[in-house]
C-alpha cells in the first residue's frame, strides 16, 4: 500500500491508513430517556496515517515534516491531492495536515513510529452546501398603519399640557429653541 501527496510518496515501512467519518448529531431528549437526536451534518473525513521510518532513512522523516509545514499564499496550509486505496474508497481526493504529527522512537527497532492526520478539504457535502441556495427571508408585517405613514402633523401628536407645563415649555423654548 502506498500514500502519495501531490505525487510525493510518503516513504516508510508498515504503512497503515485509517479513514474516519464523523457524523454530528444533537441530543433532543432533554432530561428524559428519549433517544431522539437531530442531524447536524457530516464533518470532514480524516485519514490517520501510521508508518515506520528507520533511523538510517532520516531524510524520509525530514521530507514528511517539510510537507506538513508547507504553506501557500496568506499562510494557509497546503492542500494535497491524495492517492491511496483507503482514501479513494472513502472518497477523499484532497486533504491537508491537521492536528498533530507524532514521531516516537520504537522500543525494539532502530526506527521512528510516525503518525499523522490528514483532514479532507473540499468534501462533497461541503460542495453541495456551497451550491445550495440560501434560505429565503420573509418580511414580517404587523397590523395597522406605520408611524411614518401617519398624516397627522407632529404638533398634533403631543399631549395637551397643563398650565404649569405650558409655562415651562415657553421658558424652555425661549432659552433653547427646538432643533
Image: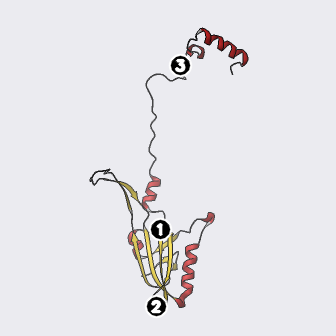
Quick one: label 2 or label 3, which is nearer the N terminus? 2
Seen in the picture, residue 24 relative to 177 is either above or below; the reply is below
Q: Quadrant of the C terminus?
A: top right
What residue is disc 3 on?
150
Q: Is 59 left, or right, of 178 in this rendering? A: left
What SS does tag 1 mark? strand
Task: Nearest to the eye among marks 1 and 2: give it.
Answer: 2
Q: CA distance from mark 2 to mark 3?
A: 87 Å
What SS does tag 2 mark? loop
Seen in the picture, residue 161 relative to 76 is either above or below; the reply is above
CB under 8 Å between callouts 3 and 1? Answer: no
Task: Tell me the residue at 44%/37% (across/down).
Answer: 138
Residue 133: assigned label = none
Relative to the observer, which residue lies in front, 174 or 121? 174
Quick one: label 3 or label 1, which is nearer the N terminus? 1
Q: CA distance from mark 1 to mark 2?
A: 30 Å
Task: Tell me the residue at 43%/69% (across/down).
Answer: 46
Quick one: label 1 or label 2, which is nearer the N terminus? 2
Seen in the picture, residue 38 relative to 167 is either above or below; the reply is below
Query: Label 3 crowding class (10 Å Cα cut-off): few <14, some 14-19, many 20+?
Result: few
Residue furthest toward the top?
163
What SS does tag 3 mark? loop
Relative to the observer, which residue lies in front, 85 or 14? 14
What residue is disc 1 on?
119
What residue is disc 2 on?
109
Q: Position of residue 89 (x, y in %)?
A: 38, 71
Amino acid at each position: 500500500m502506498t500514500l502519495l501527496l501531490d505525487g510525493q510518496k510518503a516513504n516508510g515501512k508498515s504503512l497503515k491508513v485509517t479513514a474516519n467519518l464523523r457524523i454530528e448529531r444533537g441530543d433532543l431528549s432533554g432530561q428524559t430517556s428519549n433517544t431522539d437526536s437531530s442531524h447536524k451534518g457530516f464533518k470532514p473525513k480524516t485519514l490517520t496515517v501510521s508508518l515506520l521510518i528507520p533511523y538510517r532513512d532520516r531524510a524520509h522523516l525530514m521530507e514528511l515534516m517539510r510537507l506538513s509545514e508547507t504553506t501557500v499564499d496568506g499562510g494557509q496550509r497546503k492542500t494535497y491531492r491524495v492517492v491511496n486505496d483507503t482514501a479513494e474508497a472513502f472518497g477523499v481526493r484532497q486533504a491537508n495536515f491537521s492536528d498533530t504529527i507524532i514521531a516516537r522512537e520504537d522500543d525494539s527497532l532502530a526506527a521512528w513510529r510516525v503518525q499523522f492526520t490528514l483532514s479532507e478539504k473540499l468534501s462533497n457535502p461541503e460542495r453541495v452546501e456551497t451550491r445550495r441556495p440560501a434560505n429565503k427571508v420573509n418580511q414580517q408585517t404587523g397590523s395597522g398603519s406605520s408611524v411614518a405613514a401617519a398624516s397627522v402633523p407632529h404638533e398634533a401628536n403631543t399631549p395637551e399640557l397643563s398650565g404649569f407645563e405650558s409655562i415651562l415649555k415657553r421658558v424652555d423654548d425661549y432659552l433653547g429653541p427646538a432643533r
